[in-house]
Image: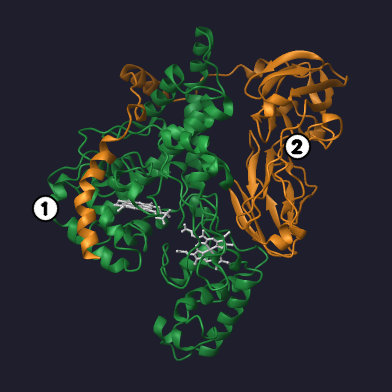
Amino acid sequence: MLKRFWMICTLLPLAFFAGCSGSPEADFVQVNSAAVEELRTKLASSGSGTETDQQEEAGPSGYATLKGRFALDGSPPPQIKLDISKDPAICAPGGKDVFANDVAVGPNGGLANIVIFANGVNEDWVHDSAKPGRTDEVIFDQKECVFLTHVVGIQTGQPMTVLNSDPVAHNLKVSTTFNQTIPEGKSVPFVASKELNSPEKMSCSIHPWMTAYLLVRNDGYFAVTAEDGSFEIPNLPAGVELEFRVWHERLNGIKGDLQVNGSAETWKKGRFEMTLEPSQDQELNVVLPAAMFN
Amino acid sequence: MLCYLQPCLTSLGESNPMKRLRIFWALLSMPMIGLVTGCGTESPDFRVNNVYMEKISRELDVKFAGQRQEDVYTALTAMFGTPDLPVVTGGEDAGVSDVLSVENLHLAAGPVIKDYEAGKGLYRQHCAHCHGVTGDGYGPTAKFLNPYPRDFRMGTFKFKSTPVGYRPTDDDLTRIVRNGINGTAMPSFKEMLDSGQIDAIVDYVKYLALRGQTERSLISLSGDYGYETPEETTETQAELLSKEVLVDEILGAIVEEWTSASETATEAEGRDPVYDFSSPEFDQSELDESIARGQQLYYGAGACVTCHGPTQLGDGQTTDYDNWTKDFFGEAAKVADAELLDAYLTAGGLPPRNIIPRNLRQGVYRGGRRPIDIYWRVKNGIDGTPMPAASSQLTDDDVWDIVNFVLSVPYQSLSQPADMPEFVRDRN
């Protein structure tokens, strides 16, 4: 033991110097000190920040529904096989293969589990049917170590009951904000208090391959595409420009060249802008090239 | 010097933390102490969060270089200053005085002053060789330690009285700095620093956390903005580098998390758990029953067995990673993705290691060995790690039963039945 101690100690100066001089230049950024000073003065000044002209913006001229479908053009990417490293009798009964199903392709290439929501909608413009404060309960269940809803959207404060229909314990870990055990056959309540701009990962630490996603929004202007790729967001403010965000598990924000209502478009950073006509359903049919998923 | 001696200490193994600590202090008291100046750099800078920039640039398809990166760090420097001259600009409006005192920061910050009495440069003297000048857990000794030193920049701490997702209280951080973290390289400072100095250092840890959280918010928000044309750049700068965004939106929200921490602390509820063994009323059979119930819960509704294993050796689930690693990779399985791993290491991430549930037979509790410490771990889970809070279906009495069981485990021999009475006397 002692021999090892001294050996390590003689070797360590080397490691020490490596550790100290090893930091690449890119670890530090030179900033302009005049710019820093200028900004500091601005931030330290009393009173609130820049006045916004939001007040002057004209309100919506009515309400409208956005609906349509997301579909894949080409053959679906190969599925990822999961490593069922625990409780195989329950999580992979009969030794069956279990797949990630992160790209869920339904009938006619329909893409399920895509999230679409209107971002930053002025609170005063939100239709009564989409106001914050929904109280109907969402059930989030798991069976055979699979979350039965792969992507779930809720409003802040809306109660969600987390069920465990398996004969083993699970725990639900929601990104960095929640982590609780759910005993076999039991349920626990969950309420989200913070709005998210992109779905957060949910997992089970006991069975780490289990994955689902949670979107939390203050208003009700969001949808998750169904098995056939369809979605509908009713009662959106019309006559004002809205920003929509679109997300898919494998792609994060959906970005790149795609087809919208039959014509070629390019989305950047998973978002696009749109102004709806009052009292008129707006179709949004999006086709994603299969290459996007490789 | 200390930078390179430290790893020897960890090589002594975790089995004897007391011995290790004694050697640690012996080394500390050597005359070389004055040389410990954060690895010899004259005036070190904060290191940028390359790992997080890499993550956001992948998510949003943007490059963190040129003006985008410069704006992020101009804002961060304007708001938080430098390691020698920390400030919290706009902190007054954001309510930062409820979280830390700027005078304290000056005590803890800066280079180590030779005259020890001056009591300045405390952080760089005592903490930076492990936690890094930036508080990124990337000090010169970090890569040799297991577990790695804490990276403060997510604001996530493990051993605290508040639930998962909430910030620690001042008491929590003070306890850690005073007592150290048993079974890890994190030393105790209660003999070395007086309470005023510890307060100053705790404020400095919070400062580094606020700064690190702000850096993350800035990076991800910056990814939303465009820099493609000169007009776009001007527009971006007018919006992003405004008091409204930097102070009201970003800093305000982060400070609020910290000011509300103490309200979220979990009070010990339920039956009085602390058995006073010296009291004439102490009833051994009552404790035995509690332990037996706790044991049932360990295998049953507590589900501890799934991770800590049927014999409490911590071998039930060993394939997961902690939040600091998963922040970049998203999920445990992705750590095996060679391209992703390479990008992570190139950006300066420390090699990922699986997080292992504690071997409960050793009786080494990192977050403290008092019943209340174990109560908090079980009731709230351990933030930043896979360890979940007990189900809200368990009562507080159930939790205390589990605590009593956990504290009894090191005193049982594997072959003996769980309701052995002798250990209780040992424990006392």
Q: From the viewer's perspective, tell me whether residue B159 is left or right of residue B388.
A: left
For badge 2, the amino acid type reads Asn
Q: Which residue is mark 2?
A: A113
Please state which of residues A88 and B68 is positioned toward the viewer in this rendering.
A88
Tell me the SS state at disc 1: helix
Q: Which chain is orange?
A: A
Residue B249 visible within the image: no
Q: Which residue is mark 1?
A: B31
**Residue lying at 52% horizontally and 54% vertically, measured from the top left:** B385
For residue A105, which quarter of the picture? top right
Q: Position of residue B58 (x, y in %)?
A: 55, 29
Q: Which mark is residue B142?
A: none
Please state which of residues A33 and A68 is positioned toward the viewer in this rendering.
A68
Tell me the SS state at disc 2: loop
Is the residue at mark 1 from the same chain as the one at mark 2? Answer: no
**Residue lying at 13% horizontally and 50% vertically, measured from the top left:** B32
Q: From the viewer's perspective, tell me whether residue B378 is left or right of residue A115.
A: left
**Residue lying at 75% horizontally and 64% vertically, measured from the top left:** A185
For badge 1, the amino acid type reads Pro
Please state which of residues B45 and B270 is positioned toward the viewer in this rendering.
B45
Give the spatial CA distance, label 1 vs label 2: 63 Å
The subunit letter for the residue under badge 1 reads B
Q: Position of residue B322 (x, y in %)?
A: 50, 50
Q: Colour of chain B?
A: green
Applied colour scheme: by chain
Q: Position of residue B428 (x, y in %)?
A: 40, 82
